[in-house]
Image (cartoon, grey):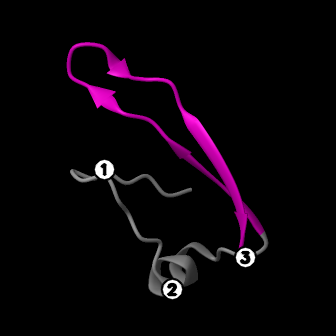
Amino acid sequence: MRQEAVHQAQWRYSAAMQSLDGAQGLLELQVAQLSESFGPGLRRKFRFTI
C-alpha cells in the first residue's frame, strides 16, 4: 500500500513506483482531500489495470 500527499491536482504513478510496489493486475486508487480543521473528506475510488 502506498500513501502520497500532493499539493497540486495531479499525481503520476511512475513505472519505478509500480515496480517498487509490485503492482500488477487490477488496482484500486483512493483519493481524499485533507483539511487541518476537518480531517479527510469523502474518498473517491478508481479501479484500473496495469
Q: Residue at x 20, y 22 (%)?
A: 36
Of the 4 image quadrants, the one containing the N terminus is: bottom right
Residue linked to disc 2? 15
Residue linked to disc 3? 24
Disc 3 packing (10 Å; few <14; some 14–19; many ≥20): few
Which structural element holds mark 3? loop
Q: Is residue 16 magenta?
A: no
Q: Position of residue 13 (x, y in %)?
A: 47, 72
Q: Position of residue 16 (x, y in %)?
A: 46, 86
Q: Is residue 28 left or right of residue 3?
A: right
Q: Residue at x 32, y 30 (%)?
A: 34
Q: Is residue 34 magenta?
A: yes
Quote the CA–CA distance across marks 3 and 2: 11 Å
Residue linked to disc 1? 5
Of the 4 image quadrants, the one containing the C terminus is: bottom right
Tell me which segment is drawn in magenta: 26-50
Q: Amino acid at mark 3?
A: Gln
Q: Amino acid at mark 1?
A: Ala
Which structural element holds mark 2? helix
